Amino acid sequence: MTMLRLFIRDWQQLRHDAGAQPRARDAARLHRKLWRKEIGLGVVVLGAAVMFVDAARGLSGLAG
């Protein structure tokens, strides 16, 4: 859960910084960094979902 909070806080900060930077070069760099952060967060969420589904299948096999 801490890792998810870290991603969310960084993502919010990047969105704020990308909108506040007047220079096009810095704004483009921040937008790319934000894009990479969003992809990383998506990968983490998908990995967690797969892990929970696998654990649920394992537990259902034990119960029934």
Image (cartoon, helix red, strand yellow):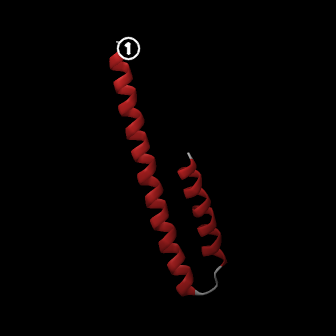
Q: Is residue 56 left or right of residue 2?
A: left
Residue at image position (44%, 51%) is 44
Residue occupied by mark 1: 63
Q: Position of residue 22 (x, y in %)?
A: 64, 85
Q: Is residue 42 left or right of residue 18?
A: left
Secondary structure category for the residue under label 1: helix
Residue 27 rendering spot, x and y as whole percentages: 56, 80
Q: Amino acid at mark 1?
A: Ala
Q: Is residue 23 left or right of residue 47?
A: right
Residue 10 versus residue 58 in the image, above or below? below
- Residue 39 is drawn in which quadrant? bottom left
Q: Is residue 53 above or below residue 29?
A: above
Closest to the observer, 37 or 58: 58
Residue drawn at the location 38% of the way across and 30% of the way down: 55
Q: For the point 34% across and 25% down, which residue is it? A: 58
- Vertically, is 15 above or below 2? below
Q: Position of residue 60 (x, y in %)?
A: 37, 20
Q: Residue at x 54, y 75 (%)?
A: 30
Near-viewer residue (62 or 45): 62
Relative height, residue 59 to residue 63 (above, below): below
Where is the C terminus found, in terms of image quarters?
top left
- Is the residue marked by circle 1 packed among few (<14), some (14-19), or many (20+) residues within 10 Å? few
**Horizontally, is 58 left or right of 27 in the view?**
left
The quadrant the N terminus occupies is top right
Farthest residue toward the top? Answer: 64
**Residue 20, image x, y percentages:** 67, 77
